[in-house]
Image (cartoon, rainbow, N blue to C red):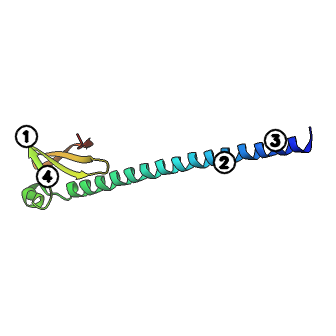
Amino acid sequence: MGVGASTIFMIFVVLVMFILAILSYLRANSHYEAMMRQMALTSDYYQSEAKLLDQYYGLDSTKLQEELSGIEYQYQDDVYVLQDPLMNGRTLKLTFKVEENQFVLLSLKTENTED
């Protein structure tokens, strides 16, 4: 094996290592972007949850209609629904009802609002 063959082999090895380095970088960048997306979704969910729970725990059952006047809500079949939009076409809904001047929290769930 001469000097030319070993030089070509060394160039080939360096080229393969360079390609592997680029592929590793692209994979790491993809994982980073996915993690940042997930972090934003999780943060958005917990901010909405905190907002809805603050509204819920701030309500007084004796003055419910007055306090709900400043909040967007739905009322159907003796059940109140507070909602807050999330990212990606989802909505966080807090559902409760009033029994004997006591609030009963029925659910806190996310729903897709896109068709």
Q: Residue at x 10, y 56 (%)?
A: 64
Pointer 2 with pointer 4, Cβ within 8 A: no
Give the residue at mark 1: 77
Mark 3 and mark 4 lie on one chain; the one further toward the N terminus is 3
Mark 3 and mark 1 lie on one chain; the one further toward the N terminus is 3
Q: Quick one: label 2, few (<14), some, or many (20+) residues within 10 Å?
A: few
Give the residue at mark 4: 73
Residue 21 is marked as 2
Pointer 1 with pointer 4, Cβ within 8 A: no
Q: Is residue 56 left or right of residue 69?
A: right
Q: Quick one: label 1, few (<14), some, or many (20+) residues within 10 Å?
A: few
Q: Is residue 22 left or right of residue 11?
A: left
Quarter where residue 52 is shown: bottom left
Mark 1 and mark 2 lie on one chain; the one further toward the N terminus is 2
Q: Nearer the viewer, mark 2 or mark 4?
A: 2
Q: Residue at x 69, y 48 (%)?
A: 18
Q: CA distance from mark 1 to mark 2?
A: 61 Å
Kind of residue at disc 2: Ala
Element class at badge 3: helix
Q: Nearer the viewer, mark 3 or mark 4?
A: 3
Give the residue at mark 3: 9
Q: Nearer the viewer, mark 3 or mark 2?
A: 3
Element class at badge 2: helix
- When the figure is inspected, residue 70 is found, relative to residue 89, above or below; the finding is below
Q: Identify the residue at the far right of this view.
A: 2
